[in-house]
Amino acid sequence: MYDAVDDPYTYENSTVLINKLDLRDQAELDDFEAEISSARANDPLPEGNLDFAHYCAVHRHLFQDVYEWAGTPRTVRVSKQGNPFCFPEHIHAQADKLFADLKARKHLENLPANEFADRAAHFLAELNAIHAFREGNGRAQLTFFALLADRADHPIDFQKLDPDAMLDAMIASFDGNESRLKAVIEELTG
């Protein structure tokens, strides 16, 4: 659950996000969101240049059936467990910087597995800290990362994905420790 103040994304007197089905129960919304985003992940994903616009298009693709704002960066400050993510007024600048660096690094192509995992862990950690969207960041990050990994010739084996280990590694990377995330990426791409 995110912490947000004066949140225009939620129903009045509620923490439930306004959604296209007008679901007011968090568990029902969570189930619907998971089902729809999983189904959309199996559809052909948007093509693009592995830039911020492409990342936004991936988020839109995954959540277009759930939220009107799918693919649009958030306009409110959010945090999880008291840890603030990038302020909304800085999202575009920070994302532009991150994706420019990714482009300068040739989208991590032609790297040995160990170096790919190291640089990919840093990219994902930074993308998570930006946390561009009000909801669905983790799924959008993983889906976009799969596109990046495929292009870099280090495809992800989703059969090896341990969601809890991935979440723990992402949390550790938010605190500056990217080694666990690197290990998870090595497992997924090895």
Image (cartoon, helix red, strand yellow):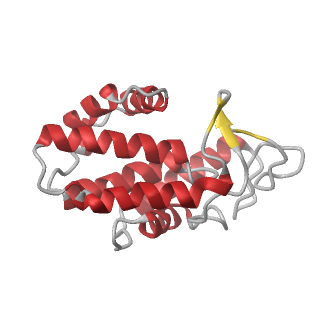
Q: Is residue 89 above or below residue 123?
A: below
Out of 113 and 136, give the one closest to the viewer.
Answer: 113
- Decide if residue 139 is in sight here: yes
> Residue 187: x and y, percent?
20, 33
Image point 24% across, 53% down: which residue?
149
Residue 66 picture quarter: bottom right
Q: Which residue, as the protein is rendered here, is positioned at the far right? A: 13
> Residue 126: x and y, percent?
44, 44
Q: Is residue 9 above or below residue 189?
A: below
Image point 47% across, 69% down: which residue?
53
Left or right: residue 113 versus residue 57 is left
Pick the quarter of the image with the N terminus. Answer: top right
Image point 55% across, 59% down: which residue?
93
Out of 103 and 169, give the one closest to the viewer.
Answer: 103
Pick the quarter of the image with the C terminus. Answer: top left
Residue 102 picture quarter: bottom left
> Residue 139: x and y, percent?
46, 49
> Residue 19: x and y, percent?
70, 59
Out of 185 and 19, give the one closest to the viewer.
Answer: 185
Out of 32 and 91, give the one closest to the viewer.
Answer: 91
Image point 74% across, 44% down: which residue?
25
Left or right: residue 71 versus residue 183 is right
